[in-house]
Amino acid sequence: MEELKIIVSEENEDNRIDRCIHSLMEDRSRTYIQKLIKDGNVLLNGKACSASTRVSTDDEIVLFIPEAIELNIPAENIPLDILYEDEDLLIVNKPKGMVVHPAPGHYTGTLVNALLYHCKDHLSGINGVLRPGIVHRIDRDTTGSLIVCKSNRAHLVMAEYLKEHSIDRRYRAIVHGSFSTQEGTINAPIGRNPNDRIKMAVVDNGKPAVTHYKVLQAWKEYSYVECRLETGRTHQIRVHMAHIQHPVLGDAVYSNRKSPYHLTGQTLHAYYLGFPHPITGEYLEIEAPLPDYFQHLLDILP
């Protein structure tokens, strides 16, 4: 384990310790630094601290940086539907049923396994050995566009974009019921469901969450909607649509309504991404075509 000592300068007087460290270690994300602090690997004047602890001039910060773990995740020749690629970025159209990164029970067949084969050693290492290149994720049974960072410099910029909510992210979904208005905004905080810690829910003490929706097509019992994320909470669209009594069709977690269409998972698709390229600044607009099963449903809904 590497030990690193930092003496706080005047320019960081009264700054948060995580921001202070990040200003001196720009090759590491604030998320990585916050995890070091949470794991007890950062001492301020010899004592453990929290990420929000304020520092003073001449304070001593000691970081204990764990040694890199050798990546033992197998590279697998799994076909990728690539929507965009350059030396810094890769945007893929993730299929239904594919887990994004390895976790207990899913160490093969994930998007990361496929990326390790396709990109070889050209993936950002900022998010650790289990999530190389992964800057955000979508659920296993959600399809559509996902950003992968091939360089650390791109990863740091994209992480800031996500934090600042400056990526235009639009999803398409088929939901239960018809709407009284064609457009609307759901502004409801999301946190862990107090009665089921596996689920998320709208709760008073949750994190701010805002979803804008627009009805694209309507039937008697279903609606086809576009949802634009202003924030990016876990399961945000699924939780918000269920909260307003329009759960996503096929969602077995947040809906108790049965689907007659024998679906595997929710009809939710990450359709559009818009953002400035993290290196060149060129504005990118990426659309992921609807999967066949989704388009078929739109064609047959009564």
Image (cartoon, grey):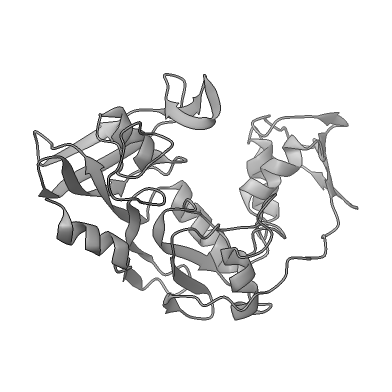
Q: Quadrant of residue 15?
A: top right
117, above or below 152, in the image:
below
Q: Horizontal placement of 215 versus 162: left or right? A: left
Residue 35: quarter of image: top right
Q: Residue at x 56, y 65 (%)?
A: 111
Q: Residue at x 42, y 22 (%)?
A: 203
Q: Dividing the picture into quarters, in which one does residue 11 lie?
A: top right
Asked whether residue 290 is in view, the answer is no
Q: Where does residue 240 sit, x and y in percent of width and height?
A: 33, 34
Q: Nearer the viewer, residue 112 or 170?
A: 112
Residue 151 pos. (x, y %) = 60, 71
Residue plotted at (41% across, 49% down): 265
Q: Is residue 147 above or below residue 3?
A: below
Q: Is residue 124 above or below residue 227?
A: below
Which residue is at the front of the view, 265 or 217? Answer: 265
**Looking at the image, is 194 positioned above or below residue 266?**
above
Where is residue 241 drawn, in percent x and y? Answer: 29, 36
Number of numbered tags placed on the structure image: 0
Q: Identify the residue at image location x=57%, y=75%.
A: 78
Instruction: Estimate the x, y position of residue 124 in percent, counting from the top left.
Output: 63, 67
Q: Please indicate, yes or no, whether residue 246 appears anywhere in the rendered image.
A: yes
